[in-house]
Image (cartoon, helix red, strand yellow):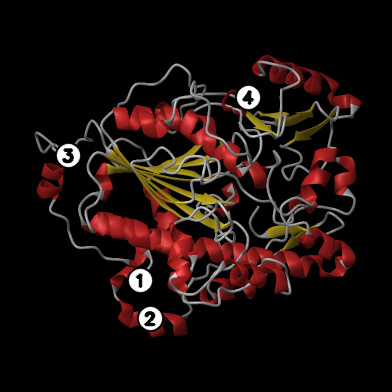
Amino acid sequence: MDGTRLTRDGRAAAVTLQPVACTSRRGFLRQAGVGALALPFARCTPDTPDRSEAGARRGAADGSGQAPDRPNILLVTTDYQSGMDVPAIGHRFLDMPTLDRLSREGATFRRHYSTAPICIPARNTWITGQYPHTHGKWENIGGWVPETSPVLMAELGAHGYQTTAVGKLHLGFPDDEPLGGFDRWVSADRKGNFGAAGQQDDYAAFLAERGLVRDDYLRMGVEAPTPHVYDWPWDESWHIDHYVGARALEIVERGELREPWFFWVSFNGPHNPWDPPARCSAPYKEMDLPLGHTFPGELDTKPTDHTRLRFNYTGDIPRLIDSDYRRRDQIIHAIRAGHYGNLSFIDEQMGRVIGTLERRGDLDDTIVLWTSDHGAHLGDHDLIHKGTHYDLSARVPLVVRHPASIEPGVRDGFSAHVDLMPTILSLAGAPLPEAMEGRDLTALLEDAEASVQEEVFIEVRGNVSIVTDRWKLGLYPHDGEGDLYDTEDDPFELINRFEDGDYADVRAELSERIRDFSPVWPPTFSVVGG
């Protein structure tokens, strides 16, 4: 997929994609005096750790180097990062040395899907191991999960883990659960919304101390030439993703994590507004970036729900495109340059945290997972944001590193967010609650050739999809519509075969599998919080 993009007439056109660095040569020289922690993780040369001391801190009895029974767990999450945003298996022009190293030394899942590719549903699937039809979060709605749902942090806490979080939990809304189920949460839960009633958090207080208020921040997005796209104009350390990385780094450096620990570091980016520091967006602005696969009138051939989504979240962008389609490529290019710049900036922050764990001798005895709640279309299918079963929205990163137990390499077997909680609990040696519906992926982590499932299901806003080796079918029962793609012949999911009689048998078989999977058909779906 790298190196080509489709023109509006459907022909493939070559693009030149070169690796970039978040910091320009001039910028790097300017920053050379700020110390080693400012360097990207992959370029750090850490001190050799005292392994015996590190082992003693974890209570290792025999010094054998084997994984401890209760390893520390670091969960790194982003928002809007698609599976293509993993340089090892996707956009190789992305400058993400931290994620590159984790991929090189860990398991990289090529076909990992968001079970519910919208923020709150995806994140509640992470922490319950359940589908939306069970935990009740089909859309971005408030309220805590039902008492009958297991919760990852509680299960780990019962197994002796200290649970700490920094950043965006977005499991409901801040007032729903002040600590999000954690022993400690440094909250930065509202990119672009801090200061609103009921949405105060630690990051908002941090900014208020520096004289920056919500209206100043939001005005940048409204007034930008391309809505919601601009270079961060204030002190870099005020940026929300720097704040999350800096707070996480402080917690590690000060030794505030009590072993065994579960530490969730959750970045707000690259969710819009696309606002990286100029040094991070500048290289991408000069590149001939992929601009998304679509064709005029595509949405007329797709389920009505996709047209509704086009104007959700920030409908001003598609309205601007519609007002002058000649600007479409320019607008998408600006969005993507900001998106990729945000990712490079996040990678840089996480590199400081990972590098510190390594210098302390803790990294190799820590299971590190990197994923995202969902991806974003960024121009694919004439859409900008999230919420469909298309790969740019639903296929997301999953990289897992733990040298003692995980074989490095790419995993081609299917996996999904509903599988994360059972997998994390299994890696922690904790009991697996019967109420979970996901699969334990440890067999796939240990053996690159293993497989734990032949399909994955996606649920969003009352719609259900199935993804198999060749086919992707979505049913939209409340509209009486569907879409079907042959992903071998049509990898960009452009041609809807749902009404094509030549595919009737495939449609019937996959529809039956969806109905067998769903406890109620059509699914009961409400946007009212619960």
> Which quadrant is the C terminus positioned in?
top right
Residue located beneath label 1 in the image: 38
Residue drawn at x 30%, y 60% is 250
Residue type, label 3:
Gly
Distance from the alpha carbon under mark 2 to that under mark 3: 38 Å
> Quadrant of the rendered structure where residue 155 is?
top left
Which secondary structure, mark 2?
helix
Residue located beneath label 4 in the image: 133
Which secondary structure, mark 3?
loop
Mark 2, residues whose alpha carbon is within 10 Å: few (<14), some, or many (≥20)? Answer: few
Give above or below for 449 relative to 375. Answer: above
Which secondary structure, mark 1?
helix
Residue located beneath label 3 in the image: 65
Residue located beneath label 2 in the image: 31
Q: Position of residue 393 (x, y in %)?
A: 66, 45
Residue type, label 1:
Ala
Taking depth in this image into account, of 57 and 92 the one nearest to the observer is 57
Q: Position of residue 363 (x, y in %)?
A: 27, 49
Which secondary structure, mark 4?
helix
